[in-house]
Amino acid sequence: MAFQQVLKHVYGGESPWSTAILWMELSKKKYGRYIKACLDHQLVGFGGIRIECDDAHITNIAVLPEYQSQGIGTSLLNELKEEAKNLSCHSMSLEVRVSNQQAISVYRSFGFEQVGIKEGYYLSAREDAIEMRLKF
């Protein structure tokens, strides 16, 4: 299963990113990193960061619904955090849907703090995003 299919399954049939944008992000090895989670040679999730000065911005963490709540997202986040530190970043940032309480809870358990709200950030659902940051 490819990255785009994981996104479609995670986001209810619609990927938040076009295939072109996703591949553009995946190809930016100098400015970003993507890692994948596989079980039995099947892609079940992935996560990515884009480096912006000394901040590692989490572009996406996605785990197939049937594999959620099994620690895969937490493992991806741990690996991304270590990669950010290895790249001399001093913080991580992200946006998350205000309705995604499960993800917000995970991010808070990692020490992320809310730093703002982006109104209408998710255009298709007309939903606000919480901006979060972790300093290290």
Image: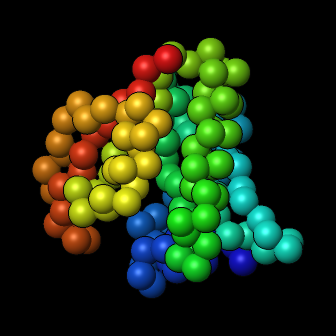
Q: Is residue 126 left or right of residue 114?
A: left
Q: Quadrant of residue 23?
A: bottom right
Residue 42 in the image: above or below residue 22 = below
Q: Is residue 1 above or below residue 48?
A: below
Q: Residue furthest right?
A: 41
Q: Quadrant of residue 101?
A: bottom left
Q: For this view, does 63 lie left or right of residue 55?
A: right
Q: Is 108 drawn above or below residue 12 in the view shown?
A: above
Give percent across and percent down for residue 8. 51, 78
Looking at the picture, how far across and down is residue 44, in whole percent?
68, 70
Identify the residue shown where x is 49% and y is 68%.
18
Q: Is residue 4 visible?
A: no
Residue closest to the far bottom: 13
User: On the rendered structure, is 97 left or right of 128?
Assistant: right
In the image, what residue occupies the spot 61% across and 73% down?
67
Residue most extreme to the left: 119
User: Which residue is at the front of the view, 47 or 68?
Assistant: 68
Question: In which quadrant will I find the N terminus?
Answer: bottom right
